[in-house]
Image (spheres, rainbow, N blue to C red):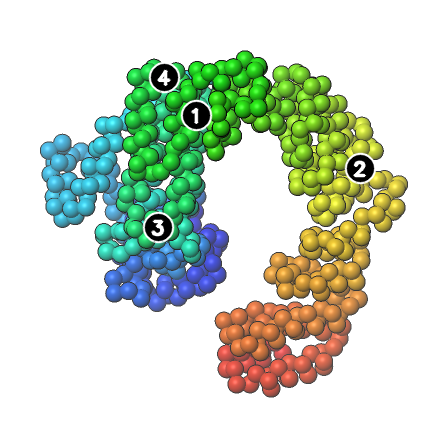
């Protein structure tokens, strides 16, 4: 198969699944492989009486998607998919190529097409529901629409495809599959469905439509998403639903927020508001709380406290007549996004200030050229380095580079540490470009102390220049207590501090065994400190062999092979042979291991 190779398969599965898939392939478990266009269907004999059904969708450069009817859910392709893919690569003649559906149906008259569907439906009654769903979608929504608007171009959206895709995702998330009379579940080990993965691609289309000014299509798409979500919930098995109740509660809130933004982006007549309130009430009965959307429709943009706020009347209650609801912050952010898209910047500033969206408030001050006020308000209200970094970015976009450096330097002194690394890295680079070496060095040292990476260490060295030897003494103690052990080791090796590198690995050797850190240190120290590397590798191998972990004997042998090479490097073959003899004597009854050890001579 062009564009498909074993490396691509291995990258999409675990080592264990690949090995078992190879075994299934070699033992002839793969049956009836049929390719129709870009779709490949196959059966794979397994532990169940009925074979598992594998479906592979091909792309120009390999695999677009692959699914199996088995219950495997440990990440990557299962062994059945691996077996089918290996068959496609190595036994292309076993793949029967047949015409795809479009080719099969091409040239048939309407009467003939109708007859085909009637006959197939008589054999598989479940097909009728699928056809009914597709027909309903086609009649209810346009297939593709895009209206040019402000900002960037609106995307073409196939609303029927949105419904179809969500229906498929919900089926894979825990719906009974009538073809195989079993349940395929693709949640995690706690039974949780990843609803973000199902919804996010479609909700992103809504954001793009709103940004392009195509509100009409955004209404159509969010309606389709909510209805498809509602349909998906009704089809879920009861135990799946119960395992995900809190996830569904969060999702209804998210959908309510997106719907609120769509509806607030247009003018609604009283009749349209009533219709939407009735529709939302119906949806809430099926999918849960959408209170934000209800409030958005009821208030619109004419709610008196909101109007007063956007005209500059700032009170402790913000844009509310009474106590604000739990979603007040989220609704304020929705309104602010709309005001920004519409260029209503002064109203944005008033509302952001009144609703306590202080980082957005300060950023908009900077965006509208009110730089001095933005800096003053930032010092008063912003407490997080991430907020300062966002403001500095806005100032830079406005070519207010001096102000950006000023507020960035202020942010380095904040008590809150979260996000300070990113702020310091940004300030380091900006200050260096602006010809402020002292500030750049100050920021560089702070960035390193928060990251302990070799890249940030080298940045300090570059900026310190002739002062590096002194500055280095200030930085190195940071590595002793650093939780970034692998990074600390990189720096110690860079400086030739071999004993420090070994000590760092000693503090958590098991952690560094499988990420390559141990091997790097052994390679760097094997000439001067050979015994250290030998003992490390032997200890790792002995742990596997003594525990009788036969499935990992090959790993143990690989550690021993590296220890042997260090023995040889120092002309200690006699010591190696003696050690190997002791292993053979200790493990002489482990028949799988003994031949592997003998091969090390």
The residue that label 1 is drawn on is 261
> Looking at the picture, how far across and down is residue 66, in whole percent?
37, 50
> Looking at the picture, how far across and down is residue 183, in whole percent?
29, 55
Q: Is residue 82 visible?
A: no
Q: Is residue 400 visible?
A: yes
* Mark 4 / mark 1, whichever is N-terminal: 1
- Say left or right for 158 vs 494: left
Label 1 residue SS: helix
Number of marks: 4
The residue that label 3 is drawn on is 242
Residue pictured at 69% horizontal, 54% vertical: 483
The residue that label 2 is drawn on is 442
Which of the two residues, 200 or 57, is positioned nearer the viewer here? 200
Q: What number is the disc on residue 393?
A: none
Label 4 residue SS: loop
Residue pictured at 39% horizontal, 53% vertical: 191
């Amino acid at each position: 198969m062009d564009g498909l190779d074993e490396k691509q398969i291995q990258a999409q599965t675990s080592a264990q699944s690949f090995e078992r898939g190879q075994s299934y392939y070699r033992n002839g478990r793969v049956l009836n492989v049929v390719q129709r266009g870009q779709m490949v269907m196959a059966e794979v004999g397994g532990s169940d009486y009925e074979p598992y059904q594998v479906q592979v969708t091909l792309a120009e450069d390999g695999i677009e998607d692959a699914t199996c009817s088995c219950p495997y859910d440990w990440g990557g392709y299962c062994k059945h998919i691996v077996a089918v893919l290996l068959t496609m690569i190595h036994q292309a003649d076993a793949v029967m190529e047949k015409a795809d559906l479009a080719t099969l149906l091409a040239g048939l008259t309407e009467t003939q097409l109708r007859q085909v569907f009637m006959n197939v439906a008589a054999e598989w009654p479940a097909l009728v529901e699928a056809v009914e769903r597709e027909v309903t979608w086609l009649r209810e929504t346009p297939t593709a629409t895009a209206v040019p608007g402000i900002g960037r171009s609106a995307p073409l959206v196939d609303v029927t495809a949105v419904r179809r895709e969500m229906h498929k995702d919900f089926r894979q998330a825990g719906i009974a599959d009538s073809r195989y009379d079993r349940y395929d579940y693709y949640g995690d080990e706690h039974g949780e469905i990843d609803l973000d993965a199902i919804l996010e691609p479609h909700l992103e289309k809504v954001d793009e439509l709103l940004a392009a000014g195509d509100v009409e299509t955004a209404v159509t798409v969010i309606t389709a998403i909510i209805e498809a979500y509602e349909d998906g919930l009704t089809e879920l098995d009861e135990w799946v639903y119960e395992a995900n109740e809190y996830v569904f509660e969060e999702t209804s809130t998210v959908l309510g927020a997106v719907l609120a933004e769509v509806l607030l982006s247009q003018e609604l007549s009283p009749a349209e508001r009533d219709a939407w309130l009735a529709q939302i009430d119906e949806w809430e009965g099926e999918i849960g709380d959408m209170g934000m959307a209800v409030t958005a429709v009821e208030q619109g943009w004419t709610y008196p406290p909101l109007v007063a706020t956007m005209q500059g009347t700032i009170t402790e209650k913000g844009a509310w007549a009474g106590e604000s609801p739990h979603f007040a912050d989220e609704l304020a952010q929705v309104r602010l996004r709309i005001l920004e898209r519409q260029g209503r910047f002064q109203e944005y500033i008033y509302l952001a200030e009144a609703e306590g969206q202080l980082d957005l408030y300060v950023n908009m001050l900077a965006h509208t050229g009110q730089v001095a006020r933005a800096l003053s308000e930032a010092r008063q209200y912003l407490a997080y380095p991430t907020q300062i970094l966002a403001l500095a970015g806005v100032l830079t976009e406005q070519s207010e580079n001096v102000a950006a450096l000023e507020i960035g330097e202020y942010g380095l002194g904040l008590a809150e540490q979260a996000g300070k690394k990113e702020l310091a890295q940004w300030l380091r680079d900006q200050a260096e470009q602006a010809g402020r070496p002292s500030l750049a060095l100050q920021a560089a040292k702070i960035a390193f102390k928060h990251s302990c990476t070799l890249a940030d260490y080298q940045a300090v060295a570059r900026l310190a220049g002739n002062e590096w030897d002194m500055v280095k003494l200030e930085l190195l103690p940071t590595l002793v207590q650093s939780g970034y052990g692998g990074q600390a080791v990189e720096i110690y090796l860079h400086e030739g501090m071999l004993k420090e590198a070994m000590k760092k690995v000693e503090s958590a050797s098991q952690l560094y065994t499988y990420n390559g850190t141990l091997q790097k240190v052994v390679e760097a120290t094997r000439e001067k400190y050979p015994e250290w590397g030998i003992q490390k590798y032997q200890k790792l191998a002995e742990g596997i062999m003594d525990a009788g972990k036969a499935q990992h004997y090959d790993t143990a042998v690989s550690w021993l092979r590296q220890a042997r090479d260090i023995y040889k490097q120092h002309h200690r073959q006699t010591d190696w042979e003696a050690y190997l003899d002791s292993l053979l004597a200790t493990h002489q009854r482990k028949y799988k291991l003994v031949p592997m050890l003998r091969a090390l001579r």
